Image: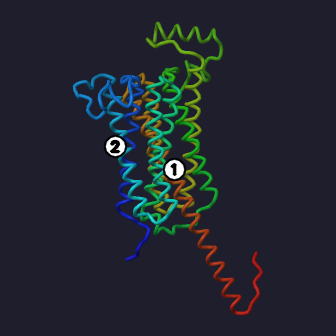
Amino acid sequence: MTQHPTYSSVLHRIALLTAIATFPLIFMGGLVTSHQAGMSVPDWPNSYGYNMFLFPPHLWIGGILYEHTHRLMATVVGFLSIILTLVAWKTEPRPWAKWLAASVLFTVILQGVLGGLRVVLVKLDLAIVHACLAQAFFCLAALTAIVTSKWWQKTSGPTVRPGTIRLAVICVLMIYLQLILGATMRHYQAGLAIPDLPLAYGKLLPPTTQAQLDTINQDRIWNLNLEPVTLTQIWLHFSHRIGACLVTTAVLALVATILIRHRGDRDLLLPAWILSALLIVQLGLGILTVYLRKPADIASAHVAVGALVLVSAFVIAVRTLRLYSLRTRLNETVRESFIKDQRHSGLHIVPA
C-alpha cells in the first residue's frame, strides 16, 4: 500500500467539513438578504443586549430568526476554522499548507468583522463586500480540502494543456465577477428591476431615458404592483443577465474542452459534469426568481447554487494546475536524468 507521508486523514476531514459547512452559511446569508433582515438584530456582537449564545429562542421571530441563526452558523464555521488551523500546524509538514489553513482562519475572522461593522455602521456597501468575501472564503476552504486530500498526494494524471488551464481560470474569474454583480444587484433591490424575461419590458434593451423610465414606473405601480425603480437598478439587473450569458458560454466551452481532451480522466470529467448540472439548475433558479417575483427561498437558493458553480469551476482550475505542474516536474526530472546518464557515458549534451 502506497504511503503518503504528508497526508493526514484528520486534517483533511476537518478541512472538508469546514468547506461543507460554508455552503449552508451562504444560503442562510442569502435568506437574510432576501428577507431584508440584515438589520433585524441592530447590535453586535451581542443580540439585543444578550450574549449571542444566550439569546432566548422565543425571541427568534421574523427577520431576527434569519439574522441570528446566520450569526450562529458563522460561529460554527469560525470554530471549525480554528480547529483546522491548530491541527494543520500540529500535523502538516508543508509550511505553505500550514499558512493556507491559517489564511482560512484569518479570512473567516475578517468576514465576521465585516458582518459586524455592517450592522454597527449601517453601511450597505459593507454588506456587499461581506457577501463577495463569503464566496472567496468558500473557494479558500475548498482549496484547503483539496491540498490536504489523498488525491493531491497520489495523482499523476494525464497531460493537461495550458489552454485548458487558462479556460478554467477565466471561468472562475467570470463566475466570481458575476457573483459580485449579483450581490450588488440584490443589496440595491434590483432583483425585479426588469420583471419580464427574456426581453426587458418587451424589448431587447431596457430603457435609457427618463421619459421611458417614467412610463415604465407607472406600469410597475398600477399594473404590476411593483415599486418604482431607477435606471441604475434596471441596468444593474440587465448587466447581470448579460453576465449570465457570458458565464454560460465560458462554462460550456470549458466542459466541452474537458470532454474532448480529457474524456478518460475522471479527476476532471466528474467535476465538469457536476459544473454542467449546477449551471442548468442555476439558470433555472434565476428564471424562476424573476417569473415568481423573487420568492425568498428560490432567490436564496440561487445565491447558494451560484456559490457551488464557482467552487466547481475552482476545483477544476486547481486540479488542472496540479496535474500540469506534476507533469512538468516529471518531464524536467526525466530530462535531467537523461542528460546526467549521457554525461556519465562520455557524450556531450547541449541543452535545448
At 57% across and 54% down in the image, what residue appears? 257
Q: Is residue 166 above or below residue 128?
A: below
Closer to the N terminus: mark 2 or mark 1?
A: 2
Q: Quadrant of residue 210?
A: top right
Q: Amino acid at mark 1?
A: Phe
Q: Would you say 60 lies left or right of 39 here? A: left
Q: How far across and down, in percent of the image, does residue 337 sit?
A: 63, 82
Q: How far across and down, in percent of the image, does residue 107 sit?
A: 48, 44
At 39% across and 35% down in the image, what residue appears? 301
At 36% across and 52% down in the image, what residue appears? 83
Q: Is residue 201 above or below residue 70?
A: above
Circle 2 — which element? Answer: helix
The quadrant of the rendering that contains the N terminus is bottom left
Q: Residue furthest left?
A: 58
Q: Amino acid at mark 2?
A: Val
Judging by the rendered image, the residue that carries numbered circle 1 is 314
Q: How far across and down, in percent of the image, does residue 271 sit?
A: 46, 53
In terms of depth relative to the viewer, which is nearer, 177 or 106?
106
Circle 1 — which element? Answer: helix
Judging by the rendered image, the residue that carries numbered circle 2 is 76
Q: Give the tally of numbered discs.
A: 2
Residue 264 visible: no
Q: Nearer the viewer, mark 2 or mark 1?
A: 2
Residue 247 visible: yes
In terms of depth relative to the viewer, which is nearer, 274 or 146?
146
Q: Is residue 212 above or below residue 159?
A: above
Q: Residue furthest bottom?
A: 345
Q: How far across and down, in percent of the image, does residue 57 sit?
A: 23, 29
